[in-house]
Image (spheres, rainbow, N blue to C red):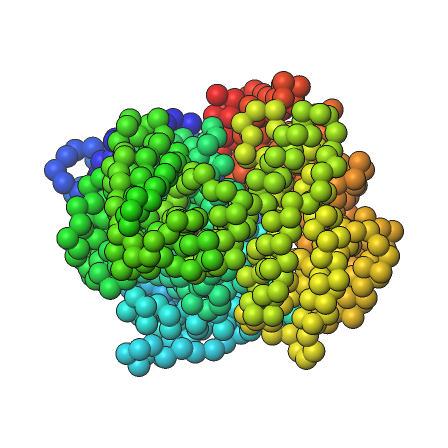
Amino acid sequence: AVEIRLEDYTPPDFLIDTVDLTFDLSPSQTHVRSQMKIHRNGVHDRALVLNGEHMTLLSVQVDGRALTENQYVLTETTLTIFDVPDQAHVVIENRIDPASNTALEGLYQSAGNFCTQCEPEGFRRITYFIDRPDVLSRYTVTLIAEADLYPILLSNGNPVAAEKCVDGKHMARWVDPHPKPSYLFALVAGNLTRITDEFVTQSGKTVELGIYVEAHNADRCDHAMASLKHAMRWDEQVYGREYDLDVFNIVAVDDFNMGAMENKGLNVFNSRYVLAKPDTATDGDYAGIESVVAHEYFHNWSGNRVTCRDWFQLSLKEGFTVFRDQEFSADMGSRAVKRIADVNLLRQVQFAEDAGPQAHPVQPKAYREINNFYTSTVYNKGAEVVRMLRNLLGADTFRQGTDLYFDRFDGQAVTIEDFVSCMAEVSDLDLAEFRQWYDVAGTPKLLVRDEYLEGQYILNIDQMVPESAKGHPYMLPFGFALFDEAGQPVLLDGKAEHILIVEQLSQSWTFSIEKNHADLLVPSLNRGFTAPVEVQYDYSDEALGVLSRADTDAFNRWDAFQRRIQRCLLGRIRMAMDVGSVGEDALPEDLSKAFGQLLLEAAQDPMFVAECIALPSENYLADQFDHDTPVEWIHHERARLRQQLAAEWESTLQLIYQSHDQDGVYRFESRAAGQRQLRRQVLSYLCSLKRSAWTQLAKEQFERADNMTESFNALVALNVSDSAEFEHVLTAFEARWRHDPLVMDKWFALQAQRSDENALARVQGLMEHPTFSIKNPNRVRALIGSFARINPLRFHDSSGSGYQWLADRIIELDAMNPQIAARMASVFNTWKRFDGNRAALMRAALKKIHDRPDCSADLAEITGKALG
Ligand code: HT7
Ligand code: ZN
């Protein structure tokens, strides 16, 4: 694939004002008729070039005249029409084969129903079109299909007609009054049940809401519907954004490459982000549904009404919309815990991406395959950049900025620059330097030093910027406060908390402090994680103890405790590497005490305590090594620390477990979910002691549970216990749920993470399970993805067996679904961070995948960059 560069952007040669599409749907021979009114954009004499792939062209007409083959040129990817008038009526007929579309882009079938996925470039697999986001058109869509097989016919916009045809078929027509780019087009046709509700907007308009699912899932839609209504209200209250069609529909499909898609008025979802009832879905699933439903709904403004000029602007809609969904979820549940979860994800996934071969700026400057740029950098770092703008401007001014942005650019395809300009215009800030956040890859480091001099406290911040920043400093907001050794806030210039604006490579601030502090002063830095940076400050263990006990910023309390744990673990891992065996040293007293102190707070805020006592993941610990990553020592030392903490606090853990037991019906509600999460952590600690009393407790929890969260959490704890009970319970779980693929994904994922020596053979065996299918992305992620991503001990087996097996699976997947294959391949990105033997084996796996003549463009871009 050729490289596409931001600097080469030119406006489209033609625009398409209206498009009238008629689909005669059939699994392997769908007929598409497209009537377009087009006009030349500007003064030029270039031909009309339409994108089109994987389809059969049947006819082309311009202004009522059929074209002969010398009047156009057809290639594998384009249809070029010569001598088109400045304004023309173009009619194209073509045929497509949805049943054999395993890439799940364009029009395809899932469970016998038709559905589409057009972002970013799927529309060109449906019909010939100018398939780029800055071509906005008004769509009319007519769907014709067999009435008994496909009673439901949906598209974007509002329904305007429906009738029976003579031949057992029926038709429905939809008109979308809002001009939109082709990537927001959608159609669905199938045998689906509709769950309905309605929403009255702030201006009094009633919107009909529909969720369409297979009939047997009709009882699993309540939570998605409630989430949708909450999101609609929140967007009115927080951003003043109202919904703009008569209907809003969501369709759940089983075969889907990502989470969901924000097609105008017709969101299509991976069924895992719609379907939930207490006995099949965990609290995590409920939270995921709430945030993805909201995310897609919020796109109606941030993405659909105001869209992207080109795909380099992807973060304009995705970063902003992730920020919006994060804030929504914070308002629905616990703000502090949401922030912890978001930062954890950022550090584990985005920081790693930014430090590896696929690193790119939030606004990439070049790509070969745009599908590879739906990344954590574009989404999560993009959201952090918007969050920084909000923090720099303050909430009210930021809202003025978003109002200006939505009003000024409504109905247009715009750039990140347009967004930032609105923020600069409403504030008195010069944001020119802030742009660096969008333009430069890599995570900046801040080196912080401080000193106390006779009533004055001096804070110094030095920026260590990534190489590609060429020595230019970043502009960022930096939350800051100071505490004394007793954990009391120390006023700085009379204030307990400051947001500093950091904008120079080296900067210092001098504050007057009232009391005379001879002893320990502890700075609380980057509070609430105001900027996506790594902060280095030489904290003593005692200082971390002060913050984890007393910081008034919950995020920094969590962070301080996690830093303390990480310091202990990394020290032990390095020691184990040196001496070649697992250590025997005792639990550090301060760490144990801080752990115990947190446990005392369990009754007050169970979810927060659960987050604090969760040990850093093996992958996160591995990321702290830039060579010879010691997978075995990471695994064993992490397990040893867990056991030591459990042994030291065993009776308290037991008490907590019991006191957070819940009676009554399951409800997805903040405190109850927090209690369940706490019980999960506590039970896993207890089970790590491998004592039959605790294994029994977990088994009882499994047997008594009336909801999936408690049932699955028992399974997780039993996995830690390594006991024979685990096998029995796994079998019981499978017997009950083997016909429910979404529930079985949990079972596949858990089995794939088992760390015993039989792990790879087990995963290979599970690929033969009747519920597993390599064609389904959810199954692939659950089984193959979990083994490769969250079972580092076995995936990185020094024999290379894990690597070779994964390489073969990726090659198999590439022939069906290149997007999923490319995503899987990114686990090999880290090969340089392993010892010579593993690095060579990982590289060999990458080369095997890459050096095939039929390697897809998606996969070749990822593996090519990884190989370097
Ligand atoms: N805007 C969507 C991104 C997307 C996607 C969704 C489903 C399947 C393939 C896809 N490619 C890109 C999802 C979102 O961020 O809302
Ligand atoms: Zn999105």
Image quadrant occupied by the N terminus: top left
Q: How many marks?
A: 0
Is residue 463 shown left or right of residue 598?
left
Residue visible at 30% across and 66% down in the picture: 239
**Image coords of residue 445 (percent x, y):** 39, 36
Which residue: 51% across, 26% down? 866
Q: Nearer the viewer, residue 800 or 243?
A: 800
> Which residue is nearer to you in this view: 82 or 384?
384
Left or right: residue 192 compared with residue 528:
right
Taking the image as drawn, is residue 363 in sight? no
| Residue at point 70%, 32% (across, down) | 632
Most distant residue in the left direction = 43
Does residue 704 appear anywhere in the picture?
Answer: yes
The correct choice, above or below, for 616 with respect to 671 in the image is above
Looking at the picture, how far across and down is residue 241, in whole percent? 30, 67
Across and down, in percent, residue 702 comes to 78, 64
Residue 441 placement: quadrant: top left
In the image: residue 779, left or right of residue 476? right
Task: Please provide percent x and percent y for residue 12.
Answer: 24, 40
Q: Is residue 159 above or below residue 594?
A: below
In the image, residue 177 sits, relative to residue 365, either above or below, namely below
At x 59% / y 54%, what residue is drawn? 594
